[in-house]
């Protein structure tokens, strides 16, 4: 452990291993000398002019906040009294922090002022609390972040939308400037550098070059050990067969886990923004496998990872060639006229549209019940994702899609990473490049890195009609094959599962979907986020969930009256769905089909 000053809390380990600036300087020099050949090798391999051209094409203002920032500064200049008060408050905070730090240098216990969130994993190392210097660095950073956030939230003359954009862009900036992201202000990196004689920095530079090569000149940060996973072996490994395929999807039927199964099959409709096997991770995390053990006949759609040849595929095509075709195929196989359908995220949005379409066609009995996992139907409060989708941004996205035919999955992945930059970007910058370590094998991050493209025509429709126009909440504002879509026509039983910390589909937004359908609605709220809150098997006994048998208008009223239950929501859903699944019949074994699950489509990578 490093010791940059004497304090009364100094322990024996600090006394035995004091900070040696000469040794640290030599370690940095050694790292620099060893890294030089790596850097020269990289420069020979990649054309600097081409790299500069790529660099110049990067959009450094993805939220289009330049104009908002200028407007904010103009408003502030018109109110000098407020400007002076902001500066005075900031200087007063600095004075209080300096006084607290001097007291800590003198051996007194520091105060908790500007300590920040106790769950912030960036500052988990003991030095951030025990060392007066690092405590000061941490608190000065958090204090400045808090000051910027407060200043923006109290800005006059800006709309709430403008404040949100400015605040989010500021957070991206401050996350990047965290002291944990730099060698000289991260005690864990300093310790590792002295311990290894700078080998961590050399190894980190090698990891950086590998990630640049992996991204063909663009930085593609490794978040897990790709070699640790193989589809069909230790991930997406539930036994089954691909029993049908077309241009857009393969339909997988899984082998039963019980001698008898429910009469009504279960069809899972995953999002095509990501691959289906988020619901079929390692065997002990697979919702698909668990549903089989509960006695369901499970089918799932595995969407194709589209290339430019599918650029003109429409949202209607995903409904027709995806869901409706799956219903027809399941009927041929099982003889059943109806299924229980489960849609996840965008797959849930498609499920709702399909069900409304079937209602308009007087064919609603093809779907017996609908389960919506973290699904947005009302996009009015669609969270941080909406910040990236103003008119200017959509036009920019569409321009890129017109040139390429698809929206690259890597572009989508970068957007999602920016929304959780500390977890999905900077933690790996520190681990891979500063600490010189390899990322830990993690199935969820392997799935997250296995991104998919979006066909241009479909994605343009989705962005404009859902995120921009919020068209689903208005009867007939959108149509499928000329048939107006009205969610109010849906009268089938619906189960809505949302997650409390969801940053992609905030639960207060997904809750609004319960008001748009007219069937018997059960709303359940799980702890954690968009993925971990859904993929939460009972065997792990993690997190919790909330239930309430009524759906008041205000989502906060629902939460205030809800009952908390420990563990997974999966058994609660099973209690709900089994009453809609009919009697038990002899298990249905899938035919040999086209190929074994998970099939070819899911293995196509960007």
Image (cartoon, rainbow, N blue to C red):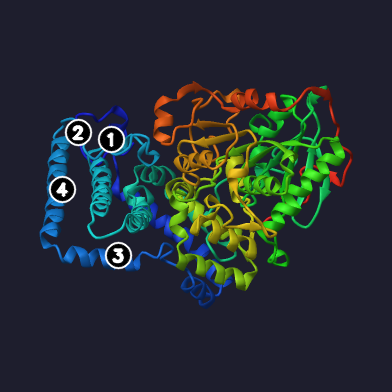
Residue ID for mark 1: 129
- Other-residue count near label 4 (Cα within 10 Å), few / some / many at <14 / 14–19 / ≥20: some
Residue ID for mark 2: 110
Residue 345 seen in the figure: no
Give residue 603's position: percent from left, percent from top. 73, 51
| Disc nearer the start of the sequence (4/1) | 4
Residue 385 seen in the figure: yes
Furthest-bottom residue in this view: 49
Which quadrant is home to the C terminus?
A: bottom right
| Disc nearer the start of the sequence (1/3) | 3
Total number of numbered discs in the rendering: 4
Q: CA distance from mark 4 to mark 1?
A: 18 Å
Q: Is residue 61 left or right of residue 466?
A: left
Q: CA distance from mark 3 to mark 2?
A: 36 Å
Give residue 598's position: percent from left, percent from top. 76, 43
| Disc nearer the start of the sequence (2/1) | 2
């Amino acid at each position: 452990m490093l010791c940059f000053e004497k304090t009364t809390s100094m322990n024996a380990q600090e006394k035995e291993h004091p900070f040696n600036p000469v040794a640290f300087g030599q370690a940095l020099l050694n790292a620099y000398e060893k890294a030089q050949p790596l850097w020269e090798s990289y420069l020979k391999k990649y054309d600097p002019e081409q790299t500069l051209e790529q660099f110049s094409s990067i959009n450094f203002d993805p939220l289009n906040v330049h104009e908002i920032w200028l407007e904010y500064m103009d408003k502030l200049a018109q109110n000098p009294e407020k400007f002076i008060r902001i500066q005075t408050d900031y200087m007063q905070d600095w004075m209080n922090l300096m006084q607290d730090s001097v007291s800590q240098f003198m051996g007194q216990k520091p105060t908790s002022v500007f300590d920040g969130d106790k769950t912030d994993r960036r500052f988990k190392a003991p030095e951030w609390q025990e060392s007066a210097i690092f405590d000061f660095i941490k608190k000065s950073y958090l204090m400045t972040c808090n000051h910027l956030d407060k200043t923006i939230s109290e800005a006059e003359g800006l709309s709430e939308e403008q404040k949100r954009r400015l605040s989010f862009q500021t957070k991206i900036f401050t996350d990047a400037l965290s002291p944990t992201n730099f060698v000289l202000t991260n005690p864990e990196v300093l310790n590792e550098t002295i311990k290894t004689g700078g080998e961590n920095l050399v190894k980190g530079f090698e990891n950086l070059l590998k990630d640049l090569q992996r991204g063909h000149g663009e930085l593609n940060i490794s978040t897990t050990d790709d070699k640790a996973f193989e589809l069909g072996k230790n991930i997406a490994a539930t036994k089954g067969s691909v029993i049908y395929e077309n241009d857009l999807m393969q339909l997988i039927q899984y082998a039963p886990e019980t001698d008898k199964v429910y009469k009504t099959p279960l069809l899972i409709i995953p999002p095509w923004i990501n691959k289906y096997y988020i619901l079929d991770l390692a065997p002990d995390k697979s919702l698909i496998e668990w549903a089989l053990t509960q006695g369901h006949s499970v089918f799932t759609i595995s969407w194709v990872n589209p290339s430019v040849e599918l650029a003109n595929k429409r949202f209607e095509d995903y409904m027709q060639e995806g869901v409706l075709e799956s219903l027809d195929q399941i009927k041929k196989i099982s003889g059943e006229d109806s299924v229980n359908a489960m849609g996840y995220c965008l797959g849930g949005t498609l499920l709702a549209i399909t069900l409304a379409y079937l209602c308009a066609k007087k064919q609603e009995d093809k779907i017996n019940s609908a389960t919506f996992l973290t699904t947005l139907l009302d996009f009015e409060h669609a969270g941080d994702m909406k910040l990236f989708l103003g008119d200017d941004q959509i036009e920019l996205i569409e321009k890129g899609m017109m040139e390429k035919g698809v929206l690259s999955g890597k572009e989508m992945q970068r957007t999602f990473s920016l929304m959780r930059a500390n977890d999905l970007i900077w933690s790996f910058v520190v681990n891979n490049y500063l600490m010189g370590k390899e990322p830990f094998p993690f199935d969820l991050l392997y799935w997250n890195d296995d991104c998919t493209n979006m066909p241009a025509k479909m994605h343009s429709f989705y962005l404009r009609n859902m995120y921009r126009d919020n068209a689903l909440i208005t009867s007939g504002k959108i149509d499928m094959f000329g048939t107006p879509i009205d969610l109010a026509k849906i009268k089938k039983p619906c189960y809505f599962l949302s997650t409390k910390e969801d940053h992609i589909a905030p639960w207060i937004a997904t809750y609004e979907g319960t008001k748009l359908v007219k069937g018997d609605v059960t709303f359940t709220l799980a702890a954690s986020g968009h993925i971990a809150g859904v993929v939460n098997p009972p065997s792990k006994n993690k997190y919790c969930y909330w239930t309430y048998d009524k759906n008041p208008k205000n989502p906060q009223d629902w939460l205030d009256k809800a009952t908390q239950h420990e563990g997974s929501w999966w058994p609660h859903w099973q209690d709900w769905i089994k009453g809609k699944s009919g009697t038990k019949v002899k298990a249905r074994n899938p035919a040999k089909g086209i190929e074994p699950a998970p099939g070819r489509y899911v293995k196509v990578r960007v």
